[in-house]
Image (cartoon, rainbow, N blue to C red):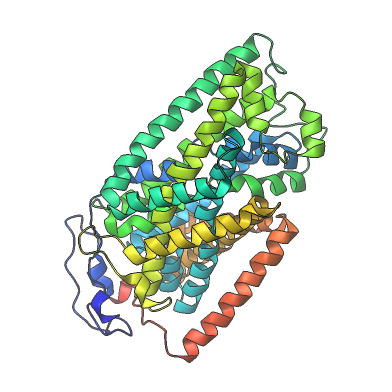
Amino acid sequence: MSEHRTTDPAGPVPGAARGPIPATGDPGVEAFGYRQELKRTLSFTDLLVYGLVFMVPIAPFGIFGGVFQASGGMVALAYAIGMLAMAFTAASYSQMSRAFPMAGSVYTYAGRGVAQPVGFIAGWMILLDYVLVPGLLYLIASVAMNSIYESVPVWVWLVAFVVLNTIVNYFGIEFTARVNRIMLVGELIVLAIFLVIGVVALATGEGRGFDFSPVYNSDTFSLELVLGAVSIAVLSFLGFDGISTLAEENKDAARSLGKSMIAALVLAGTLFIVQTWVAALLVPDPDTLIAEGDAAGTAFYDAAEVAGGAWLGTLTAVATAIAWGFANSLVAQAATSRLLFAMARDRQLPSVLARIDPKHRVPVNATLFVAVISLALGIYMSQRDDGITLLSTLVNFGALSAFLLLHVSVVVHYLVRRKSHDYWRHLAVPVIGFAILVAVVVNADVAAQTLGFTWLGIGVVLLVVLLATGRKPELRAEENL
């Protein structure tokens, strides 16, 4: 791995000279023993757009029925609690991204903020999210397109989406950023059309009219019920954390990473609450949806049809397919490749994944690897009746488990090591965030818990093998530089 480091392959040498400091005043990756290989071109706006596209402003379109059923109709409440839970997590991400402005997300933060073995486990758990989520997105989009154009098989749509996104990502992060902006505008236009037509329809007597049942319904409310729904709704919020993987391509101060994460979360969360509130009031038969669920995944499109007719239902379905299959999976593939690159650079994954394309300055092998995994996973899961549900639960469990370790890293790094007296940001926020996530994980689907802990067990075994074979990188914390 010496081609990717400025020091010995086993890790940065203690006492090695500090690398150049960027114009922002933040320590560069050279200060942590690496070369700056990725291209720094992304602004705060690029990061914000990236986060919004990753989260998908119309994300609830695709899973609305499942959240509606799980929450007993209080779908807007589930999204509001989800945003609150993720707000504490975003605040912890903000703190750690300033301390360690490098690619790798929670793998880097837990590894350097607590200890390398903890970082590996955090990275392993977040891989359950990052590696699987592109396949999940491709599958949802391909199934949606197949429902509209039944003559085209699901696997054909999968191949088309994977190839297109891989080509875009290969041409570099700047090209990806430009595509992101176009896709974001398109999604917001579709959302605006639905909201305007939906509100007008409610005002003219369609649906149930305006009420607060999507936020609170005394007939069905229970904390356990709502937290169970949050464990599903949180899928819509996953993505703001992907901004952290672009730390080595951010051209502004490190604090812009945290600011963009929080801004993306608040903006997307507000849109989620508003659109699900309106849609919940337009559901044609809410009692049946709660009792029988939404196996076909068309609940949102049915609500849109009530508001504006068949054309609006079709528009929202097509928009969902494009948003999930192209826009969201595009940034998901980019984020996943950066995480794999960071772990491979530290010898925690095969070194071939750390190769950077010399022309486009992207982790090319990691990008191609994600494409292959996504295609194989998508095709396999398309043959299962529970494919989408299984992937969704695994993605959520992996992300939430990694977020728990993120909160721990804030307390250890700032409060224990650096003796910080900022008890709100470095103790209260991570502790509250940790407690909320534990409650959500405990109330998650049993199958998700079983599969998630199995994945964790595999990670522990791999960690033991890595330590036994001497593949432990020597990571220096910021205060030792």
Q: Which residue is drawn at 68% across and 60% down?
A: 448
Quadrant including the N terminus: bottom left
Q: Which residue extends farthest top?
A: 204
Q: Nearer the viewer, residue 240 or 404?
A: 240
Q: Residue at x 69, y 45 (%)?
A: 229
Q: In this view, does 350 lie to the left or right of 394?
A: left
Q: Where is residue 5 in the image (x, y as percent from the top left)?
A: 25, 77
Q: Nearer the viewer, residue 244 or 478?
A: 244
Quadrant position of residue 449: bottom right
Q: Residue at x 78, y 42 (%)?
A: 222
Q: In this view, does 355 lie to the left or right of 427?
A: left
Quadrant position of residue 187: top left
Does 326 sit above or below residue 97? above
Q: In this view, does 36 lie to the left or right of 213?
A: left
Q: Position of residue 355 (x, y in %)?
A: 30, 70
Quadrant position of residue 4: bottom left
- Residue 418 seen in this snapshot: no
Q: Which of 395 and 429 is in front in this view?
A: 395
Quadrant including the C terminus: bottom left
Does 330 sit above or below residue 471? above
Q: Position of residue 374 (x, y in %)?
A: 50, 58
- Residue 209 seen in this snapshot: yes
Does 284 sit above or below residue 180? above
Q: Which residue is drawn at 64% across and 34% down?
A: 76
Q: Where is residue 96 in the image (x, y as percent from the top left)?
A: 40, 61
Q: In this view, does 167 lie to the left or right of 109?
A: left
